[in-house]
Amino acid sequence: MPSGLFLPRQNCYGVCFPALASQEPDPIASSPAIIETRLEGGTPVCLRRVDRGDEQRIREGIARMSPRSRYMRFFSGAATPPDWVIDRLLDADGDMHLAWGAIDMSVPGEPAIGAVHAFREEEDRELAEFSVAILDDWHGQGLGKILTATLLLEAQAEGIARFAMNTLAENRSAIAFARLLGGQRTGSDGTVVAYELLVDEALDRLRQAGDPPGILAVFDAFEKM
């Protein structure tokens, strides 16, 4: 797996936010605009919020997932999700919908390799539905933990205290991840299992574990805000 070097901050801004290539992050923002870190194998990645300009990256990323991974994430193995699903993933406003993506900075085209989402409940603004998707080639590199820590930190800053997670009962890795974060099972219909976790506790668990090492760059970036 290619390792490469971290790109200079201006280059990362140019790739992740073309319109911000000559700008600095807003000093009063509650979350960093971008985060540069590396995965377990050394691959440099750029983390940033998802926006409307990411439609092609999202479509290409979903198409690159294996049918099994698409089924586990979307409860369907279709290579192309309905347009309403894509629209929902892109509609991140920083309040009702928080979303971060990871871009591989080591290869031409800088493809998206994973994303996390938190959809806030209208009736309970301290609760959000959590989901994560990582492309198959990047499983086992710590990207899921890195992206999850990023989302949890922004959620904490935005006043979200709890995440709800729904996964297929057969998805053992997702269930193990929920438990690693301190998630407690709240129900099941036999096909889908529901978990709920506390944002503060999940962050404490990830911070104390410090695994993968690249996750520390995420905590550092938010602590500097």
Image (cartoon, rainbow, N blue to C red):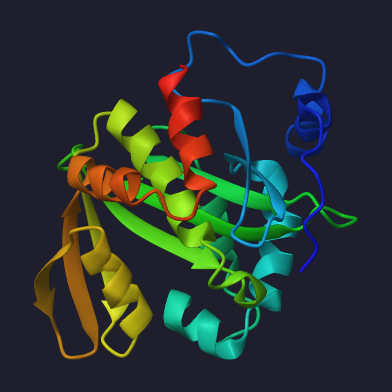
Q: Residue at position x 81%, y 23% from top? A: 21
Query: What x and y, as percent, mark residue 94?
Result: 45, 33
Q: Nearer the viewer, residue 145 or 89?
A: 145
Q: Is residue 91 visible?
A: no
Q: Nearer the viewer, residue 115 or 216?
A: 216
Query: How many badges with numbers are in the image?
Result: 0
Query: What x and y, as percent, mark residue 216?
Result: 47, 39
Q: Nearer the viewer, residue 37 or 70?
A: 37
Please state if 201 lies on the left or on the right of 215 as rendered: left
Q: Is residue 140 visible?
A: yes
The relative height of residue 63 versus residue 153 in the rendered view (above or below) is below
The relative height of residue 10 versus residue 103 in the rendered view (above or below) is above
Image quadrant in which the N terminus is located: bottom right
Q: Quadrant of residue 194?
A: bottom left
Please state if 223 lies on the left or on the right of 198 as rendered: right
The relative height of residue 117 versus residue 28 in the rendered view (above or below) is below
Q: Quadrant of residue 52?
A: top right
Query: What x and y, as percent, mark residue 26?
Result: 58, 12
Q: Residue furthest top?
A: 27
Please state if 63 lies on the left or on the right of 221 as rendered: right
Q: Residue at position x 53%, y 45% from top? A: 100
Q: Residue at position x 56%, y 73% from top? A: 139
